Amino acid sequence: MKLKNLFASQWGIVGIGVIIGILAALLQKLGNPPNMGVCVACFERDIAGALGLHRAEVVQYMRPEIIGFVLGSLVAAYIFKEFKPRGGSATIVRFILGVFAMIGALIFLGCPWRALLRLAGGDGNAIFGLAGLAVGVWVGTLFLKQGYNLGRSQATHAAAGWMMPLMCLGFLALMLAFPQIQGEPKSGVLFYSVKGPGSQHASLAVSLGIGLLIGFLAQRSRFCTMGALRDLILFRQMHLFSGVLGLLVAAFATNFILGQFHPGFAGQPVAHTMGVWNFGGMVLAGLAFALAGGCPGRQLFLAGEGDGDAAVFVLGMIAGAGISHNFGLASSPAGIGPHGAAALLIGLVVCVFIGFTMRNQTR
Amino acid sequence: MSNIIDARGLSCPQPVLMTLNEIKKGAAGPIVVLVDADASRENVVRSAQGKNWSASIEDAGAEGFRITLTRN
């Protein structure tokens, strides 16, 4: 019998939500973009930019927070004997879901974490995004009730579980080998933003340290924003949702104290005011997260504990970021991209197809 | 006779969904649930306790966990 996992208790999950909320708001004070202390979608998009997978000049930076999330989770998983290399559960489907999750998130301009942080910073547009997220997850629960699932994963080689952590170590090595040069758009093979959100970041040590801490805590607590809504809708369970509320309240309080709370709809940082698309983008993202079984943060933490399917979802999101910016699908503060609406429609069709066709493969 | 639910290899929320469906069927218990992830173990136990069932857990090593649920 194992020791009880305190982090996964009711107060544990609330406490971890509170810690994430405080740290995220603090990261904004320390240099990260406004209302974007930690945004998994935005930061994976920035990583795609740093690697040159898209060439949107304002969003290119190898975000150490993401690296920290995976490695922090890896450390926690090893300490508590929860590192379980596994994979093989409809892997290609997870990649596709990752692609469209990112496309949806970049129409709204944020993942569920950032939706909460935007609201905590006073951005009223986030209400549309969060409403869309809830609707997307709700549609996902309808599929789950009909027997939707992606099938069983299998145990695999430890090295397979190490692929995503090793990739993150590689990213970190690239950052150390090719550090940012003030005013330069490129250092070695890595792209950096000279202006825009990609140029706004806390120091490498701070970002990595906070990323590692959040990764560690979230692995222990199973913190998941999509799961919060899903469990609330599907099982009427408040457990994960209480963590999300903790994050929201703590980020709001920290923002308020630091003078980062600016209520309103127009002129919010890295946001647009097109309510329909803020809503629609997150319907797509929410549905894709629900079908894939975790919010983008949770997928990183799962990847850190050896889940190769979650790792492929992450790669799908990074690829999706490249597609989003190269094809003009991503929004900007001016509004949605020229092909954002078409991509949203295609994404919804693909997700509904997946939801209807992948059922009862549990035997 | 106890019912066995094999939820090994399935990720959340599947193990919980399967467990709650079995509970809903009105089984007198006990119900045995096999899971291989720690998060699944916690979720199944928490959900069953929420329905007023109690759980005992056996760590089956590489095979995962064997959770026995009994109605209170």
Image (spheres, coloured by chain):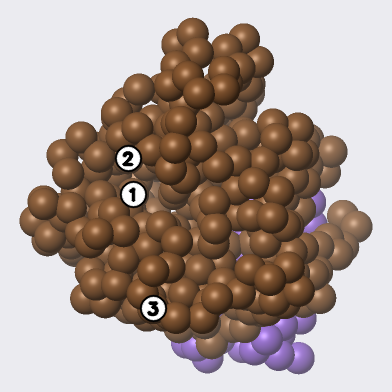
Chain colours: A brown, B purple
Quadrant of the rendered image containing residue A84: top right
Quadrant of the rendered image containing residue A207: top right
Residue type (three-letter) at the residue carrying disc 2: Ala
**Mark 1 residue element:** helix
**Mark 2 residue element:** helix
**Residue A137 image offset from top left, x and y in percent:** 37, 72
Mark 2 chain: A
Alpha-carbon span between mark 3 and mark 1: 23 Å
Residue A141 can be seen, yes or no: no
Indicate which disc, 1 or 2, sits on the residue closer to the N terminus.
1
Same-chain status of marks 3 and 2: yes
Which mark's residue is nearer the viewer, 3 or 1? 3
- In the image, what residue occupies the spot 47% across and 26% down? A192
Q: Which residue is mark 1?
A: A102
Residue type (three-letter) at the residue carrying disc 1: Met
Q: Specify the label residue A265 is tagged with.
A: 3
